[in-house]
Image (cartoon, rainbow, N blue to C red):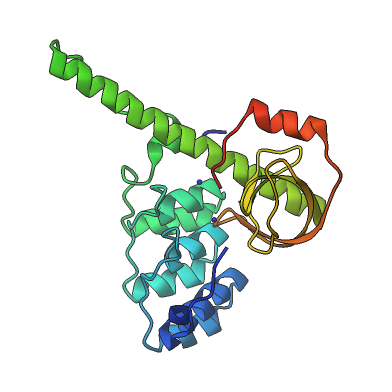
Amino acid sequence: MAATLPTQITSDSERPDSLRVKLLMKAIQRGDVTEVEVVLSGDVDVNTTTPHGTTPLMSAAAYGHLEIVRALLKRGAALNQKRSDGFTALALAAFFGQQETVRELLACGADVRGSNCALLTGKGTPMTWIRGTLSLLAAMRAFEITYAGYDEHQRGMETYWSLRWLMQEGVKELEATVLRENLVRADGMPLVLRVPSLPEAAANTRVRLAVKSVDLLERTIECIYRDTLAPDDAAVAAIAADPSEKA
């Protein structure tokens, strides 16, 4: 399918406005319209974003909470704001199959052209070929940028479906192989993640992790180190075959 994250507490995150933002995003996830209205009545930026650029409107659209979408729009939520991966609230609603929300956003004037439609539909703007070295270089650069975008998108989709499988199967523990520092790759799936609680370990060390939480919208997973396992040649060979270290 061709259609794109853990939070470290700092002193800044303890500010009242940050706490209100957290309350707002949690209320949206639960679909609690009353709580959302209460939080919005305070001094909170309706267009605040998570580290990956997700706004309250994008979250509500992805979860299909129509009344919350309307409440956010009424308070001035940016309809066509883009996330760091280029997705808007409309694109996220479409991806997660929220048909009523899609209709609502379109009725409010959501821009289809700015909603990552190339990734959702596979349709792009045809390139007109112009002779000359500069045109050739420009075309090559455009190809590189497009390829990099699709490569990043593919990795995002691999992460999404890996996380979805973990939730579907109710997986509580993972076995993984250390890539470097606190970066590990889960065994048997294209999932690379960071584990802050991981003790110092050499590359290719195998570990067992406890799954604490999974967020499909942000495509993140939070795990805790449990113990170290015996070496597994097959797992090491799999990493050698695909040495990607993006998380």
Q: Quadrant of residue 189?
A: top right
Residue 7 in view (yes/no): yes
Using the image as rendered, state which of residue 186 and residue 227 is in the foreground: 227
**In the image, is residue 245 above or below residue 104?**
above
Residue 126 in view (yes/no): no
Q: Quadrant of the N terminus?
A: top right
**In the image, is residue 136 above or below residue 21?**
above
Q: Residue at x 76, y 37 (%)?
A: 188
Using the image as rendered, state which of residue 29 and residue 20 is in the foreground: 20
Using the image as rendered, state which of residue 111 and residue 7 is in the foreground: 7
Q: Residue at x 39, y 52 (%)?
A: 84
Q: Quadrant of residue 79?
A: bottom left
Number of callouts in the render? 0
Residue 148: horizontal and vertical position, in percent?
41, 32
- Left or right, residue 232 beside residue 33: right
Please identify the residue farthest to the top as the structure is shown: 131
- Left or right, residue 160 beside residue 115: right
Residue 49: horizontal and vertical position, in percent?
41, 66
Q: Residue at x 44, y 88 (%)?
A: 16
- Left or right, residue 246 beside residue 213: left
Q: Residue at x 69, y 59 (%)?
A: 198
**In the image, is residue 241 above or below residue 42?**
above
- Left or right, residue 209 beside residue 56: right
Residue 208: horizontal and vertical position, in percent?
80, 53
